Image (cartoon, helix red, strand yellow):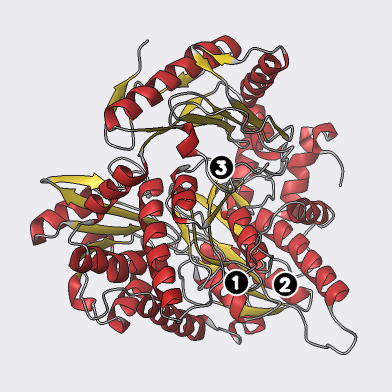
Amino acid sequence: MADSSTIPLSDLVQQWLDWDHDPKTRAEILRLRDEKNVAELEKRLRKRIEFGTAGLRGRMQAGFSSMNGLTVIQASQGLAKYIKMSHQQSSSQESEQPPSVIIGRDARYNSKQFAMLAANAFAAEGIRVLWYQNAGPTPLVPFGVLKNPGAWGVMVTASHNPARDNGLYASNGCQINSPMDMEIAEIIGENLEPWPNAWDTTDESKYLALDCYEDTAKIYCDAVTQFVNSIKLAPGSPPRPFVYTPLHGVGNSIMSRLCEQLGIKDLITVVAEQQEPDPDFPTVTFPNPEESGALDLAMKTADAVGRDLIIANDPDADRLAVVEKVNGTWKKLTGDQLGILLASYMLDTITSQQQQGQHTRKKIAMLTTAVSTSMLSKFARAESFHAQETLTGFKWLGNVARRLESSTPPPPPPPTGYTVPFAFEEALGYMFPAISYDKDGLTAALVFAAAAEPHWRINEGVTPYEKLTQLYARYGYFENLNTYFVSPDVGVTRKLFEGSGKEMEMGMGMVGSLPILRWRDVTLGFDSGPTGKGEGEGEGEGEGEGEQLPADPNSQMVTVWSERGIRFTLRGSGTEPKIKIYIESCSASRDDAVKAICDAFMAVLEDWIRPCAPGVACAERIVTSSGFVFDVPR
């Protein structure tokens, strides 16, 4: 593949017009050419959309840098070649089964078209397509892959991104990881020109004859129902009535089936205005349950019907949000808080089953990511299970979980391998390996609503929020401040990380008034190790967290440990000029923890951000995990 940076713009325009057979996107480039809009053409055509561990994702518009029919064809052709090559290398001589791929899609604009174009590419390579005719939740794809050994999965979705976005995501049971993504990207670059008949989706019999959506949905619902029933500590106790919203996405059909199979359909009230898939997302600005205002309509509905619990999925139903009314005020649990609650429940469940001889006595392991709460590590040390931190994303959580399940724990040796019941990340993602090795907002919703909540209410006499308060009292109060800085461009972001690294090389062991007790730079593969622990930090760091994370030269991520139980991570977005910051403090009280994270934020802002990356901006008001509103001094 020629380096597009050296190709004349006029040649890129002609290449697009030669390859694109979609009248709408072709007309976009023709219009820009006729208007002589060089800047926009450069933006659209010069840089190609990158295939990474999360597949493709971007705005739906014409151009090599965006999501459209042509870039989906190009990615699918490369992925098809890779799957066929991998199958040939791994198959025995006796096996004559062709490789297979499951293709699912959400209900966004163009999702079906993109899925059909992808299916066309796989069929052209002799790959058996297991087609999901219905728009459906993302969790059905990794689940389907596990139920079809050797299959790959492709999901056309933009998850919780704005309506104008879409994406294509690939899986082989877990999300693909490096270096596989780079190998696939290289083969995509060798197959950019559409193959013959690449645009011809009129012969749907090539893949529609193998529609397996309904079969997979039934098996999935049966598996989740059986799993939820198997982990109940208060069997027979109904959950608290709740309001549910799929945020105009595809979650409601499967959620309704699950509730019916669990016998709780009468206890769910669906937000009427948001229950059907709608690619315009008309009632929300951003269809992301993390965003302010996204759940306002759900709260209004809950108030109207007298419910004090809200369950929400994002549009492709792989994430879960929970909102509870506490003393008359709606309280949205953060991803970290809900993750700790679910980890606590799964530990109680597995421990109880082991004591009763109903579960293997393997050592328990649970996972989280480097930007999620370190409370899991402290919890693990206190309760004698293994907690492990991974790099960000379920591509890491899923693969590490599978590795732990087949590994040998430290002596005294229990049966080979850990049992890994649960993993989570701060961005509302929760994984239950009994179902799949990827985030699953539907399974998480039913574990919470139908198993955990009744146990806490009936057996312990507490609400979910009160249970969280109990955990804080036992293991220390953890407060988080997660936000981002907007950078003028990715070059400024790079300078920031280079500048902070130089400070460490010069022996500057302070960030403002905060001493650096430990420094980890994932980009360089450097970790000074847990050489010291500040007040509260001894509790904040637990089994597994002391391990060095693998180096990732393509990332920008620095983590610093300091006194007052402070840990913060700066992480570059990679695809947009944003610098994300995750700050946590573990303290004996909320007030102390809130002050610590606000002090840490100002130290980073004044000592690193402003000197190393002038022009970077942040929000004027930031809400912490407990709801404290921090007004950033100017």
Quadrant housing residue 527: top right
Three-letter residue code for mark 1: Ile
Mark 1 residue crowding within 10 angstroms, few (<14) / some (14–19) / many (20+): many
Q: Mark 3 against mark 2, which lies toward the viewer?
A: 3
Q: Quadrant of residue 407?
A: bottom right
Q: Tag 2, which secondary structure?
A: helix
Quadrant of the rendering where the C terminus is positioned: top left
Q: Which mark is residue 255?
A: none
Secondary structure beneath dot 1 equals: strand
Q: Which residue does the image show at 29% across and 32% down from the upper left? A: 589
Q: What residue appears at the point 36 percent right and 52 percent down from the top-left corner? A: 338
309 or 206: which is nearer to us? 309
Can you give x and y, in whole percent of width and height, for residue 337 in the image? 36, 48
From the viewer's side, name the closer residue of 392 and 590: 590
User: Residue 128's spot in the image, x, y percent?
Assistant: 70, 81
Q: CA distance from mark 1 to mark 2?
A: 10 Å
Left or right, 482 with reference to 266: right
Q: Is residue 586 above or below residue 52?
A: above
Q: Marks 1 and 3: in contact by CB < 8 Å?
A: no
Q: Secondary structure at mark 3?
A: loop
Q: Residues within 10 Å of mark 2 (few under 14, many from 20)?
A: many
Q: Specify the label residue 103 is tagged with.
A: 1
- For the point 18% across and 77% down, which residue is it? 266
Near mark 3 (Cα within 10 A), the count class, few <14, some 14-19 or many ≥20, is many
Report how far apart the C-alphas of labels 3 and 1 lie in the structure. Answer: 31 Å
Residue matched to label 2 = 122
Q: Is residue 80 left or right of residue 27?
A: right
Q: Which residue is mark 3?
A: 370
